[in-house]
Amino acid sequence: MRTKFFTVLSVLVLLSMIISACGGATPAPTPTAVPPTPTPAKVEQPTQSVAPTAAPAKALKIGLVTDTGGVNDKSFNQSAWAGVQKAVADLGVEANFIESKQTTDYEKNIDAFATEGYDMIVTVGFLMGDATAKKAKEYPNIKFAIIDNAFFPTKDSATCPDTVKDCYADGGLTNVTSLMFQEDEVGYLAGVLAACMSKTGVIGSVAGMEIPPVVRFVVGYQTGAKSVKADIKALNQYIPSFVDPAKGKEVGLAMIAQKADVIFGVGGNTGNGGLTAAKEKGAMGIGVDVDQYLTFADVKDILITSAAKNVDVAVYGAIKELVGSQLKAGMETANIKNGGVGLAPYHDWESKISQDCKDKVTAATDGLKSGALKTGYGEAAAAPAKALKIGLVTDTGGVNDKSFNQSAWAGVQKAVADLGVEANFIESKQTTDYEKNIDAFATEGYDMIVTVGFLMGDATAKKAKEYPNIKFAIIDNAFFPTKDSATCPDTVKDCYADGGLTNVTSLMFQEDEVGYLAGVLAACMSKTGVIGSVAGMEIPPVVRFVVGYQTGAKSVKADIKALNQYIPSFVDPAKGKEVGLAMIAQKADVIFGVGGNTGNGGLTAAKEKGAMGIGVDVDQYLTFADVKDILITSAAKNVDVAVYGAIKELVGSQLKAGMETANIKNGGVGLAPYHDWESKISQDCKDKVTAATDGLKSGALKTGYQP
């Protein structure tokens, strides 16, 4: 079909060139009333014109307006255009498309077709609802078909107010047909297969904008997965764009780092980024909207199936009804029962998917057809829009810093899987981003904002006062009455109770305690009597780590030389490596990297020179594979546990303002496992760590840190 189309088009172009050379050609009509996008000097017009050879002037003219994903999005815009193209070939209609570059293009692109006398305009996507309804009323003699948006009487709606009974029959949309799909049903089947195929018990979905069709896919996916394995962890993140594959890949990689081995890409090119992550890491993938094995060749070998909605069939069917004068206003719904949605073939995975998994998909299909199974969307879904929304604002280290930002996000993701909340993150690129990133979540109606790091204290306090109905949880910063402080002056007794921060919970950690244990182990393992710490900015949490480390080391060897350098950045691994190499040149044989990516540079130096390393914040053996073989342990603060706990308290209406402190005694901080060094660390060193742990718990030992 595609070859035939381009052959015909090539012949037509050649003929037009010959005629033009003779000077007698009249150009085909093009839309002229539309300001072009994005260059004002050029008029936007439909492209890819296909016309039958017989009486083209009398053929019905079909125009398709894409969403911002474009006609080659490997997803539903592309599928819609395929349906139109089939109608050109089979039904003798003419067709063009216009790609919307941004949402402000919708109306003028519809106008372009309407003013050129098109008989039917197909608009693609939920977001085009308002523009379609407005223009349908403006052009009552043109038929409209919209994909993924149905209209219902709604209070104060400019499109269809609740003063009418039916938006189509008496609400002014008598020329509109909504082509709808029960994405939750095919999402359910995708979830059944994903759960059955998963080896880790963790699956993920990288979703586009949080709009009804996408939400239906996600809810069905999670419900289907839990029908197979009730305890499966189903991660999800909505990303506010359909054209951001880089962000989709980033989110996909983060999910895979949390052991997800199946990724459902459900958001146009953004979801495609999630599939790219799966390809890169050897995970399984599930496509969306179309059989992406046929449209997204780069990832086809990892696709176990695609959750297909036959948009091409629906569009073709609507055009066929128009040609036969049978097209009616209202909704036409595609589902499992009528074959309008369904899983794509397994292709390369046909022999790799067990018969048991195939049988589970067949049984679920039958259950959905009969109505015996419910997808969880709708009444049973507990109205997804009402779920608590959690936003996380990272420090400048970013969500993949292999340290505390990454750990904080892992805690949020666990809450998504276990507690039914929704979540997104924003990465701060510089400190001036803090306030505007908080504003971004606050203005979108988020219920809780988690801010990561001591440096975010002022921004968090300021915005907490500005948004008193939003809960805030900040990691590593507690507020105390301080003279001349703009945040909390000493005229109040308690910053939380009467200082305006009644909506703030500070998640604090006694880093000096776990730093002490790291120092004990470092001193015991050192052969040279010299150890080092490559530290980030000289702020309280980092200082606590360093002071504890040095005190713990001296408790084992009073004459040990404990080198340290603070570096005024958490995102300078090159500087960290330079400092680490300098310490190793001074005979340091254990390096404690304690400063995000800057500290990671110190660990890289240790790896390069064959020294031992100690990670920080998380078990870096699991997050920093490049250096895992030299890590004797990590000084871990369980940021993920603290963040998850705060969200759980929020869900249970038990979250209180003030400080929640994690320490050795309550298990909130501690050394990570020794991993590859388990057999290399002597029993004497292990006993020293155990004794120090007991001493810190009982209060018999002091870390040396003075607040």
Image (spheres, rainbow, N blue to C red):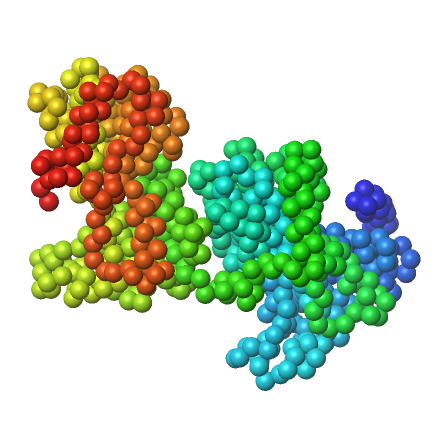
Which picture quadrant has residue 581? top left
Up/down of 329 relative to 533, above or below:
below
Q: Nearer the viewer, residue 196 or 132?
A: 196
Q: Position of residue 26 (x, y in %)?
A: 82, 58
Residue located at (82% from left, 62% from top): 320
Q: Position of residue 42 (x, y in %)?
A: 63, 56
Residue furthest to the bottom: 163
Residue 45 visible from this viewpoint:
no
Q: Look at the image and tell me in which quarter the C terminus lies.
A: top left
Residue 671 visible from this viewpoint:
yes
Q: Position of residue 63 (x, y in %)?
A: 73, 61
Relative to 702, 189 lies left or right: right
Residue furthest to the right: 54
Q: Nearer the viewer, residue 278 or 51?
A: 278
Relative to 543, 238 lies left or right: right
Up/down of 279 relative to 477, above or below:
above
Q: Position of residue 640 (x, y in %)?
A: 33, 45
Q: Nearer the viewer, residue 130 or 465?
A: 465
